[in-house]
Amino acid sequence: MVRVRAIFEKSGRAKYISHLDLNRCMLRIFRRSRLPIWYTEGFNPHPYYSFALALSLGFESRCEILDFNLNEEMPFDEVRDRLNAVMPEGMRIVSVAEQVQKITAIAKAEYTFVLSTETPSELMTAIEELLGSPEILIEKKTKKGIKEVDIKPDMEVVSCELLENGVAMTMRLPAGTQTNYNPTLFFEALRKSTEISFEPERICRTGILCENNENFS
């Protein structure tokens, strides 16, 4: 058995494919690709595969991770090409390789986005004030109910750039088996701290990282 890890992009219309629908979609992709996929044993055999992190609906990504097993060795380029031949619009396998790190090594995810507004300078000032505050509190839904959490200690702003029609940001947030944040928490906190109107656009997950900020592979 060969343990395989594929990195794929999800963009355009595909960003509206929910995580549940993505699972169904992948079953069809595997069948159409005619790859020698390893199936689970038991009463109801099915292809074994898993996604490292669920992606929020409406988000694009350049780095989604799909793990699956093959019954026999074959060139990874061929695996990539056979999957891409049956991928839906907006999804594309970027690379295929043998699994190296365990999923538990994932610690962060990097996102880029634009906050579109009619008053970019004022919004930039509001963002700087929020980032400069001692804490950034939001209400987060957990298994035990609604909980107020401070996202500032776990939030790393890589860049924040003023544009003609808004503010472009790159941000790293915790991700993995313990804690998962996404940029909507920051948007929520910003809306609570300012009356300036803005709309998040072009939200894209651009990296899945380990604790040392190296790319997960």
Image (cartoon, rainbow, N blue to C red):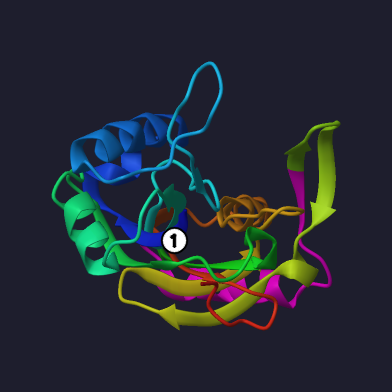
Inspect the magenta stretch and tell me whether residue 126 lies in it.
yes
Q: Is residue 71 left or right of residue 94?
A: right
- Residue 162 visible (yes or no): yes
Residue 105, above or below 70: below
- Residue lying at the far left of the rendered structure: 85
Residue toward you, 162 or 31: 31
- Residue 17 visible (yes or no): no
For the point 28% across and 62% down, the residue is: 74
Inspect the magenta stretch and tell me whether residue 20 lies in it.
no
Q: Position of residue 217 (x, y in %)?
A: 51, 72
How many residues crowd around disc 1 within 10 Å: few (fewer than 14), some, or many (20 or more)?
Answer: many
- Quarter occupied by residue 76: bottom left
For the point 17% across and 45% down, the residue is: 89
Q: Position of residue 103 (x, y in %)?
A: 63, 60
Reading the image, the residue beneath label 1 is 5
Q: Is residue 195 left or right of residue 137?
A: left
- Quarter occupied by residue 32: top left
Q: Which residues are magenta?
A: 117-139
Q: Position of residue 60 (x, y in %)?
A: 36, 55
Residue 25, above or below 214: above
